[in-house]
Image: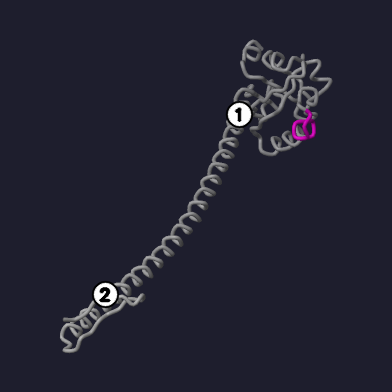
Amino acid sequence: REIFNSATDCIYVHDFETEEIVDINLATEQLLGYSLTELRVNAVDIFSSGEPEYSTKGARKLFDHVKQKGHINFIWHHKHKNGKLMWTENSMKIMELNGIKRIVVMGRDISNRIKNEKELEQYRNHLEILVKERTEEIQQMNEELASANEELIATNDELSLLNTKLQEQIEKNNQTQAELERNETKFRSFLEQSSEGMSIFDSSGQIIEWNK
């Protein structure tokens, strides 16, 4: 009995047939706040959270399983006598105590671990949301940059086309100018070599040039 009560893990001993609690150790009383007498009268529901899977109905499934397999590990959501909720990690197995077949449950408080896991999960979800939002922002920026790049390419194409046309026009102007200069050279040569007197008048009738 001394060893039973000195254990730091909670220990519940159930009748194999009725599944009622027949004994608990001191650690169980401290964790739940209930005495053996209270637990015997009120059974599983009194120290469980009340959720469907953590109730007498949920416990009965565990008892059926352990009776078939001989051992099962599970997590349970407890409720202290003062209303505080807590989580325990448990091991249930079939044992013989003083020659009597019993169902023995040994468990430990893992409330802090569950709390940390939930906080980590919340942080992970929050981080995933931030990553998703940032990814969407980057994707939008990339789409805007791609659109701007397409507009820039189109503008460059237009400028290139205009530049080509301008170069063509300059070339035509240069050709025209060269043709005019050749014609003027020919005309002056003709004017200078002519044996007849010739004069050139402007639009107002004034002589601006003549041959010798």
Does the magenta stretch mainly form a helix, a strand or a loop? loop
Q: Say which quadrant the C terminus sits in.
A: bottom left
Q: Which residue sits at x=66%, y=25%?
A: 88
Snapshot quadrant of residue 124: top right
Q: Residues within 10 Å of mark 2 (few under 14, many from 20)?
A: few
Which residue in the structure is indicated by mark 2? 208
185 vs 145, nearest the viewer = 185
Dot 2: element:
strand
Q: Position of residue 175 (x, y in %)?
A: 28, 76
Q: Which residue sits at x=71%, y=27%?
A: 77
Is residue 150 a member of the stretch shown in magenta? no
Reading the chain from its start, which is encountered first: label 2 or label 1? 1
Q: CA distance from mark 2 to mark 1?
A: 102 Å
Snapshot quadrant of residue 89: top right
Q: Residues within 10 Å of mark 1 (few under 14, many from 20)?
A: few
Q: Classify 5 as above or below 64.
A: above
Q: Which residue sits at x=64%, y=10%?
A: 2
Foreground tag (2 vs 1) = 2
142 vs 40, nearest the viewer = 142
Q: Classify 198 as above or below 123.
A: below
User: What's under tag 1, amino acid-wise?
Assistant: Glu
Q: Position of residue 40 (x, y in %)?
A: 81, 20
Q: Classify 81 as above or below 157.
A: above
User: What's under tag 2, amino acid-wise?
Assistant: Ile
- Determine whether, in the image, residue 162 is placed left or right of residue 51: left
Range of magenta residues:
50-57
- Which dot marks residue 119? 1
Residue positioned most to the right = 41
80 vs 123, nearest the viewer = 123
